[in-house]
Image (cartoon, helix red, strand yellow):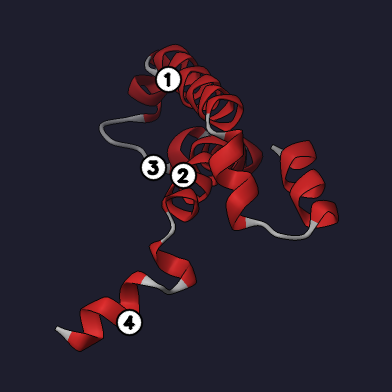
Amino acid sequence: MKIRDEMKDTELSKPGIGILALVILLIFIPFWESWYGTSLWGLNLYSPAHMDAISDQLRVFKIVLVCAGVFLLLRKSNAIKTVIKSSAARNLVLACC
Protein backbone atom coordinates (compact mmCIF):
# COMPACT_ATOMS: atom_id res chain seq x y z
CA MET A 1 0.00 0.00 0.00
CA LYS A 2 2.86 2.36 0.78
CA ILE A 3 4.40 1.81 -2.66
CA ARG A 4 1.13 2.72 -4.38
CA ASP A 5 0.89 5.95 -2.40
CA GLU A 6 4.45 6.85 -3.36
CA MET A 7 3.79 6.11 -7.04
CA LYS A 8 0.78 8.43 -7.06
CA ASP A 9 3.08 11.36 -6.40
CA THR A 10 5.54 10.63 -9.21
CA GLU A 11 5.75 12.51 -12.47
CA LEU A 12 4.53 9.52 -14.47
CA SER A 13 1.17 9.50 -12.75
CA LYS A 14 0.12 12.86 -14.21
CA PRO A 15 -2.69 12.55 -16.77
CA GLY A 16 -0.90 14.87 -19.19
CA ILE A 17 1.88 12.37 -19.84
CA GLY A 18 -0.52 9.85 -21.34
CA ILE A 19 -2.16 12.56 -23.42
CA LEU A 20 1.21 13.82 -24.63
CA ALA A 21 2.31 10.30 -25.57
CA LEU A 22 -0.97 9.71 -27.42
CA VAL A 23 -0.65 12.99 -29.32
CA ILE A 24 2.91 12.17 -30.34
CA LEU A 25 1.88 8.70 -31.54
CA LEU A 26 -1.18 9.95 -33.43
CA ILE A 27 0.83 12.59 -35.26
CA PHE A 28 4.19 10.95 -35.86
CA ILE A 29 3.31 7.31 -36.69
CA PRO A 30 1.49 8.34 -39.91
CA PHE A 31 4.44 10.62 -40.72
CA TRP A 32 6.96 7.81 -40.21
CA GLU A 33 4.86 5.44 -42.29
CA SER A 34 4.66 7.97 -45.13
CA TRP A 35 8.38 8.73 -44.89
CA TYR A 36 9.23 5.10 -45.67
CA GLY A 37 7.72 5.38 -49.12
CA THR A 38 5.74 2.18 -49.45
CA SER A 39 2.44 1.29 -47.85
CA LEU A 40 2.75 -0.09 -44.33
CA TRP A 41 6.54 -0.22 -44.40
CA GLY A 42 6.63 -2.43 -47.49
CA LEU A 43 4.23 -5.03 -46.14
CA ASN A 44 2.51 -6.95 -48.93
CA LEU A 45 -0.54 -8.60 -47.39
CA TYR A 46 -1.72 -10.39 -50.50
CA SER A 47 0.05 -8.79 -53.42
CA PRO A 48 1.47 -5.42 -54.46
CA ALA A 49 -1.71 -4.83 -56.49
CA HIS A 50 -3.82 -5.34 -53.37
CA MET A 51 -1.70 -2.90 -51.38
CA ASP A 52 -2.03 -0.38 -54.20
CA ALA A 53 -5.80 -0.81 -54.08
CA ILE A 54 -5.98 -0.06 -50.35
CA SER A 55 -3.52 2.83 -50.44
CA ASP A 56 -6.32 5.40 -50.75
CA GLN A 57 -8.08 4.04 -47.66
CA LEU A 58 -4.77 4.07 -45.84
CA ARG A 59 -4.25 7.75 -46.69
CA VAL A 60 -7.70 8.63 -45.34
CA PHE A 61 -6.95 6.66 -42.16
CA LYS A 62 -3.64 8.52 -41.70
CA ILE A 63 -5.37 11.87 -42.18
CA VAL A 64 -7.94 10.91 -39.54
CA LEU A 65 -5.14 9.94 -37.13
CA VAL A 66 -3.31 13.23 -37.63
CA CYS A 67 -6.53 15.24 -37.25
CA ALA A 68 -7.33 13.38 -34.04
CA GLY A 69 -3.84 14.11 -32.74
CA VAL A 70 -4.08 17.82 -33.56
CA PHE A 71 -7.57 18.02 -32.04
CA LEU A 72 -6.35 16.31 -28.87
CA LEU A 73 -3.32 18.61 -28.76
CA LEU A 74 -5.48 21.72 -29.00
CA ARG A 75 -8.16 20.42 -26.67
CA LYS A 76 -5.83 19.18 -23.92
CA SER A 77 -3.04 21.75 -24.19
CA ASN A 78 -3.50 22.76 -20.54
CA ALA A 79 -2.84 19.19 -19.39
CA ILE A 80 0.28 19.09 -21.57
CA LYS A 81 1.44 22.40 -20.12
CA THR A 82 1.35 20.90 -16.62
CA VAL A 83 3.68 18.09 -17.72
CA ILE A 84 6.29 20.23 -19.47
CA LYS A 85 7.62 22.81 -17.01
CA SER A 86 10.04 24.64 -19.30
CA SER A 87 8.35 27.21 -21.52
CA ALA A 88 10.95 26.71 -24.26
CA ALA A 89 10.39 22.95 -24.32
CA ARG A 90 6.61 23.42 -24.21
CA ASN A 91 6.73 25.82 -27.15
CA LEU A 92 8.94 23.38 -29.05
CA VAL A 93 6.51 20.51 -28.51
CA LEU A 94 3.53 22.63 -29.52
CA ALA A 95 5.37 23.93 -32.59
CA CYS A 96 6.54 20.47 -33.72
CA CYS A 97 3.12 18.91 -33.35
Sequence-wise first label, 4 or 3: 4
Mark 2 lies on residue: 19
Left or right side of 30 for 40: left
Cα distance in 3D space between marks 2 and 3:
29 Å
Q: Are marks 3 and 1 in contact (CB under 8 Å)?
A: no
Measured from the top left, where is residue 57 in percent x and y?
A: 40, 14
**Residue at image location 52% in from the left, 40% down from the top:** 23
Nearer to us of marks 4 and 3 is: 4
Amino acid on which disc 1 is placed: Phe
Q: Which residue in the protein does label 3 denote?
A: 43
Q: Nearer the viewer, residue 82 or 35?
A: 82
Looking at numbered disc 4 in the image, what kind of residue is underneath it?
A: Glu
Q: Which residue is mark 1?
A: 61
Mark 4 and mark 3: Cα distance apart in space: 44 Å
Q: Nearer the viewer, residue 39 or 76?
A: 76
Q: Which residue is at the front of the view, 86 or 23?
A: 86
Q: Amino acid at mark 2?
A: Ile
Residue that carries the numbered disc 4 in the rendered image: 6
As helix, strand or loop, the secondary structure at mark 4 comes to helix
Q: Residue at x 32, y 30 (%)?
A: 47
